[in-house]
Every structure is written in structure tokens, then in C-alpha cells.
Amino acid sequence: MTLSPPLQRVRTRRPPPRKRSHRGRWIALAVIVLVPAAAAAAVWALSGATLASDGSALGRVDLQPFAGRLVSVHARTADGRVIPLAVSDGRITPRRKVAPGERITLSVVVRRPGWASWALGDERHETLTVEAPAAHVTNRWVTAGDGHAQVQFDMPVDRVSTGGATVAGRTVTLPARAAAGAASVAAAARPWETLGAPVRITWFPRSRRPVVLAAPGPNARLEPLAPLRLTFSKPVSRVLGGKEPTIVPSVPGHWATPDAHTLLFRPAGSGAPFNSNLTVRFPSPIAVMSAHRAAHTTKSFRLSVAPASFLRLQQLLAQEGYLPVDWAPRETEAPRTMRSELAAAVDPPAGHFRWRYPETPHELQALWRTGEPTEVTRGAVMMFQDEHDLTVDGIAGPRVWHAALADAVAGKRRTAGYSYVFVHRSLPQKLTLWHNGSVVLTSPGNTGVPAAPTALGTFPVFEHIPVGTMSGTNPDGSHYNDPGIQWISYFHGGEALHAFTRASFGTPQSLGCVELPLDTAARVWPYTPIGTLVTIED
């Protein structure tokens, strides 16, 4: 038997093992990382909240899908006042009206959903400062037609202050009931705003010449310090060529130009004299008109200044201590300025007079008339004139009024008291001197003889001298000249209170004067300054 050779193991060569690739791992890792990141980015991109201005509301808040929910909205003014708000469809509007142009800070808080808050935070805060819109007039000087004047604004307007006006976007049509006139127009651009500051609108008729609207108009009556406003349809510089109108007679004051179309004259000091006529002159002809008068081409127009009230003169003289009465206003007086005093001189305030002293002689009381000229007021004016170094004539002219008003503004008051003299011609004749509520003295005196009697009536003292010469004509035609007469107070023509040497007193002995013993006359004289009333009665 043949043995086979033993089987030999056949060696086979295995291929080398492949290196495992990491590419898949990186892809898987990228998927794990990038997908959440993309999701987070998408959430971030869609979770925004913006606060912006709005064309109709105070502001607008826009929330993206993943932004969350709006939890609070606040508004404050620049001075910290809180404004209540309403929010609808993201639009924020005030629940109380705000002023045009007012600066307001809006603050909103948005709370994110819980699944996003871990990455983006619980809340988002946004702040915005806005300014409430303000509509401005673009044409203040308007040519009116068909009874209407169209005013243009720089933005749409919600409403205006003028009754009867029509609002259409940026155009407001005013009813022009007169051919020319002026009106103050206040506008609000939004329903949630108050009306803004009023703007003066002036309208003119169509005209070939420039038109000036005068206020007050031609032939109007004005107060001494009333301003004169001239509003021109064209710029003043074009109409007047750089010149100013003149006022004749001249009135203290100055012209101002509030705007390119307007001249404003403001009187100064005590203004134009009471009860005077003024002429306003232009360098060249112009169509002058007022709200109530048609245009008239001219180079000038006239104005009149109101007269002062006699009642107010009595009020001032009483307040300043020149009358036996005091005066008090019914209501609290405005601060004493020259302007307020001039206005009161034309239109006296209501009030009441009362006697300064409880024991006032009935003869004096019978002379007083409120608002009417009597010797009581005339004497007070003369006393005022004498104490202010003015011509003593008893007439309240411009200088008297100026001084009286200046004293009123300064609060000056005469403190020398009030005197009154009354003389009885019935026998025995006597003189009574009353001062500040009391009889100072009673003395016999001599009045005029029947051929030269002392005139009956009440007269203010007009000359007051310690010694002088008295001369005149005797009843028989002869003349007399008596020097050295003492303590003279002239009250009616040549009649006077004075000292005279006589053997007796109490009967008619003079030539019209009231003669007194020397010592009595010396006592009476200090109480009888210019303006003191002397009554001669039977």
C-alpha cells in the first residue's frame, strides 16, 4: 500500500483590513449640532419685537411669530407724567389727549414663550421716544373768494377750532363772512391730540392794489394805549419800500414787525391824549379797509381817542384825598399800572362813594353829585393843580389826567385833610370853619353892604396869600387902595376871606368880602388853601 504524502495546508493571503472612515460620524455630528442651531436661529429670527412710530397712532409694536406676548406698554411725558394707553392691532394710542409736539417716551415689555426663554431670556424691552405730530399753517395771508378762505397745512388735519370750518386733508376752508378779516385758528393733526397753539389767519379781497387791514379800522375809537395793527396782503417791505407810516400828532411809542406782512404800533407812556383825533399816513396810496368797511384807496385814515370819564376823575380824586368822600371798587382792583389806569379812565370800574367823616355839614353834602360836575369836584381839581404846580383853572386837561394817573400808579394820597367854610349872611353874621369832621371855630364876620353884597353860592378859593394890597371901587364911584391886608383867601372875583380892623363884627360892612378879626383870620388862613370851598348863604 502506498501511502499518500500528507496533506499540506495551503496558505491563503488575506487582504489587509480596511481602515474605518470617520466621515459618517462627522456628518452625524453635524446633523446633531446644526439642526438645533438652525432651529434656534429660526426661532431667534422669528422672535423679534419692534417699536416704531406710526402714521395714525402714537406708536406701533410689531411681534413676530415666536416673539411671545405683549405684557405691558407705558408712556411718559418729558416731565414724568404717565399717559394712559390703548393698544389695538399693535397700534398704541393715548386714552387722554396729548398736546401737539409733546415728546413722549414709549416702553414695551414682551414675554417670550417658555421653550424659547432658556436661550433668549424671559423678556424683551423696547423703548422709543416720539413727538406728537403738529400741523403747521403754510399760508397765513389768504385771498378770499366766494365767501371762503382756504388755509393750507403741512399735514392732514383732524379738526380745527374755528366754527363752520370745513376740513379736507391738508386744506381747511374758513367761512369769510366779511371781505377782509382775521381769525385765530388752532388745529389738531390727530383725534387723540388737543388743539395746538392758535395761528392768526388774515384774508383779503382780490385787488389790483396791495390791501391793508387796519385794526382798529378807519374812524374807530380807541383807548390811549390801544395798539394799532396793520396787516398787508403783500410783504410790508414791498408795499412801503422800507418806510414806516407816521401818526399825526405824534404819539410816543414804536413800530414793530411781528411778521413779514404786519406792522404793529404800540403806544408808550400815557399814550395818545384823551379825546383827540389821530391821522395815520402812508408813503403811497393803498387800499385801506377794516373787517366792517370796504376798501378805500387813500394815503391816510383817521382814528379818534376816547374821552376820559368824569366819573373816573371823581374816583381818582377821592382815592387820592382831594374830596370829602372816599371811593372803593366793587371788585378787587387789578395791579395799578399806567395801562390799567388808562383803561379805567375810559371805562370806570364799578364801586361806591362814602363820606369820609360822620359829621359832614349838610351844606357840603348837598353839593355832591356822583358823576356830575359841581363845585366840589372843581375845587378838588384846583387843589390838585396847585399841589402839582399846574395852572389852576379847575379844568381837568391832559396834564391833570397824566398827573392823577401817575399818582394812582404810585399809590400817592394827600394827607392834609379836608376843610370847608360856610358863612351865614343873616344877622348876626358868622363864619364857621369845619375840618376833618369837626368844627374848628365859629366867629362873627362882616359881609358886603347892600350896595356891594357878598354873592350867594359856593366858590373854591383860587388865590391864597398871607398879605397883599386890596383895591377897587366904592359904591359912590371913588377908588380905594388898602395895602397890608393880611390872611387873604380869594374865592369869587374880588371877594375874599381876610383880616380887617373894625369896631364890630357880625353885620354887613364890607364891599363884598368876608372880614374877620385879625386873630380869627390868622387861624382860618392855614385851613383855606387853593381849592377850599366857601359857601355864602342866608
Image: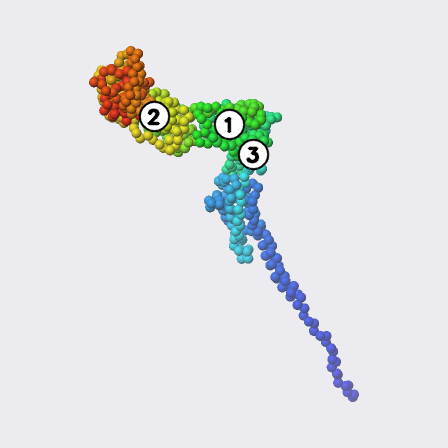
* Dot 2 and dot 1 residues touching (CB under 8 Å): no
Residue at screen point 50% across, 39% down: 99
Q: Which residue is mark 2?
A: 383
* Dot 1 and dot 3 residues touching (CB under 8 Å): no
User: Residue 239 sits in which quadrant?
Assistant: top right
Q: Amino acid at mark 2?
A: Met
Residue 231 position within the rendered picture, expressed as x and y whole percent measured from the top left:
54, 30
Of marks 1 and 3, which one's residue comes earlier in the chain? 1
Residue 425 position within the rendered picture, expressed as x and y whole percent measured from the top left:
25, 16
Residue 45 horizontal side relative to residue 227, left or right: right
Q: Quick one: label 2, few (<14), some, or many (20+) residues within 10 Å?
A: many
Residue at screen point 59% across, 28% down: 210
Q: Is residue 434 visible?
A: no
User: Residue 60 sits in which quadrant?
Assistant: top right
Q: Which mark is residue 364?
A: none
Query: Which quadrant would the N terminus be assigned to in this image?
Result: bottom right
Q: Amino acid at mark 3?
A: Ala
Q: Which label lies toward us, 1 or 3? A: 1
Q: Nearer the viewer, residue 254 or 484?
A: 484
Q: In what element is the residue under mark 3?
A: loop
Q: Quick one: label 1, few (<14), some, or many (20+) residues within 10 Å?
A: some
Q: Which residue is mark 1?
A: 247
Give the CA separation, mark 3 to mark 2.
Answer: 51 Å
Query: Which quadrant would the C terminus be assigned to in this image?
Result: top left
Residue 92 position within the rendered picture, expressed as x and y whole percent measured from the top left:
53, 44
Q: Nearer the viewer, residue 29 or 466?
A: 466
Q: Is residue 529 visible?
A: yes
Q: Which residue is mark 3?
A: 260
Q: Quick one: label 3, few (<14), some, or many (20+) residues within 10 Å?
A: few
Residue 356 horizontal side relative to residue 182, left or right: left
